[in-house]
Image: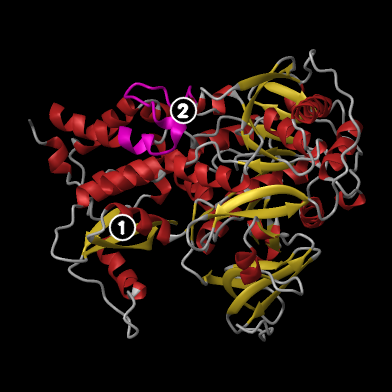
Amino acid sequence: MEVLLLQVGTHEALGATTAHDVSDYRAPSPLAVANLGTAFLNVARARADHPAVAANRDVFSYDWIRRAANCVGGCLRARLRHVLGARVALQLSNSPEYLAAFYGTLLADCVVVPLPISLEEHRRRQILGSCKPEILITRLSDFNSQEAHSPATTLALPENSNEKISFSPPVRRDRDLAMLLFTSGSMGMPKGVMLSHRNLLANADSILRGLPICADDRALAVLPFCHAFGNSILQTHILSGATLLIDRLTFPSSIVEALRRLEATSFSAVPEVYSMLLKYGHLGELPLPALRYMTVAGGGLRYDLATEIENRIRPASFHVMYGQSEATARLASLPPEQLRIRRGSIGRPISGVDLAVMDEANRELPAGIIGMLCARGENVMLGYWQDKSATTDVLSGDGWLRTGDLAHCDEDGFFYLHGRASLLVKVQGHRVHPAEIEGLVEAGFPETCAVAIPMARGDETRFVLFLAPRDDRPINVMKIRAVCQSELPAYKQPLHYEVLDRFPLTPGYKIDRSALALLVPRIRGTPRIQADDILTQS
Amino acid sequence: MTANRKQLEADLIQFVRSRGSRHVAVILRTDLLESGLLDSLLLMDFIFHIEEAYGVRFDSDQVNPSNFRTIEDIVGFVLSQLSMPQGQSG
């Protein structure tokens, strides 16, 4: 795998970031073309001087991104013997380089594989081993020091004087694979969600019909573009000719401050970010006159927090949305005026999407009955990468996707979630399977039986790890904790470790996870290490 | 107190290093903000970890750059909170 390091050369300095360009521009429907790269080029030519990205103090126009994407595309075509469908991994944080690499890869007829910039090493190996990218595109600040020895080529954006490029338009279209999004599968192994050009264009079109996104919008992009939800923020705004705002957004207060300073008109995030904004961000204390709306998706936001956000951002509106990577991004939306009427609802299907609640035999259930939430539409993925059996588990022949979420529908067609059908848990918008944590512990400590149970931590979800001996050997909690800390990213690490003599069993002699879940509230709130231990004089 | 400061430092360094290969070189005085290593999700995890492991609660004004710039700053903050005669919950 060759490494391509992107480096930003010339660009405009701060200036246009706060200039409000009130234009009549209306982007064509994303469905007017068959290739996402072409859709981008059409908007980029029409919006050449408009800022596409305002990153910290620099502004990158649509023309800049277009030239940079051409530069990346030309470079890929020059380097790859077989470009058609070749995988190109992106390891880039939100940046103009990400956009150049994303659209450049599509313009070269390759497939984008976005990777989170902080990824556990074993997971990274699994993903790269599965899809075998020819090239990894990154930049120095997003690059792992461990790989520094890989042969790397530096590409200066937006133009590389050594490689004058003019190349033919892309030929991949419609149902051809455009993007591989890796997500946690049912047994904890990563699964590659295959999204076509049509999937991405159709979902962007649906969202644009439901949300008030326009060409003058300025969206503060806190979600990583490599995430399905972050990607849909990227596509919908770029295909509208709007501006993405990128800033240092570490602290809840810095998000609120950036919304105000950059005059953001919209903001989208996962539930955990919203609870942080409420708790530590002083959201609503200072007015945000430019803000028109906020959206939440990527997990359930508690009803009282949703209404609290709505109160604090008024007169801006708050849109609760629902979706999943397998459906490109978004499936349902709750109109803001329904938030208090349809308490806890994820709303109705967005344009171009059908939702239904079905039983085990894929028969639609009547209103009020809980079953599997299923979705159909042009945004539903092609399938999982090189995994036919996992694909047929969730995709039926007639195009229905089983989301894995339990739900019911009310008499008026509004949907309500009732948790995951499987053990998958959403943490920070990422799906985590308890088997990932249990497998790690049991592999290293065969004398120990481990069961990870989700626990509510404030408004978030984390894990308690229950441990029980398999034989008479003792359990070394400190060592197990050390392994979890070194092998798992923080959000997957158990918050508590609880040793039991034996696990409760179901009548079928399986470990009774619901009985363990009942023990969780008893453990909560007990610090693992007493304050006295820390303060003891040595 | 110094010995236990060491324990706290080691715990938090280990915690941040587990984040991924970009974080393995983090030491006590690495500037987590300047280097871009502390993002909003890691910040959230830090808060959870510290609240759960040490019983320290953050006020809204305490989640700021001066308490989170380096591991050393975080350790200093946790120790200052632990030594305050506040109601010890949980």
The total of numbered circles placed on residues is: 2
Marks 2 and 1: CB-CB under 8 Å?
no
Instruction: Give the distance between the C-alpha atoms of the residues marked 2 and 1, in whole angstroms.
Output: 28 Å
Secondary structure at badge 1 equals helix
Query: How is the protein colored in the picture?
Result: secondary structure
- The C terminus of chain A is located in which quarter? top left
Q: Residue at x 73, y 26 (%)?
A: A17
**Which residue position is annotated with label 1?**
A442
- Residue B57 can be seen, yes or no: no
User: Which mark is drawn over residue A146?
Assistant: 2
Rendered image quadrant of residue A366: bottom right
User: Eyeballing the image, is A11 above or below A404?
Assistant: above
2 and 1 marks on the same chain? yes
Residue A411 as seen in the image, left or right of residue A478: right
Residue A210 as seen in the image, left or right of residue A433: right
The disc, 2 or 1, on the residue closer to the chain's N-terminal end is 2
Give x and y (percent) for residue A179: 71, 47
Q: Is B17 colored magenta in this rendering?
A: yes
Residue kind at label 2, given as amino acid type? Gln
The one of A405 and A504 positioned closer to us in this rendering: A504
Q: In the rendered structure, which segment of residues is drawn in magenta?
A: B13-35
Give x and y (percent) for residue A409: 65, 78
**Magenta highlight: main SS:** loop
Residue kind at label 1, given as amino acid type? Glu
Rendered image quadrant of residue A258: top right
- Residue B22 can be seen, yes or no: yes
Give x and y (percent) for residue A492: 41, 50
Give x and y (percent) for residue A185: 54, 59
Q: Specify the subunit that label 2 lies on.
A: A
Secondary structure at badge 2 equals helix
The one of A241 and A160 positioned closer to us in this rendering: A160
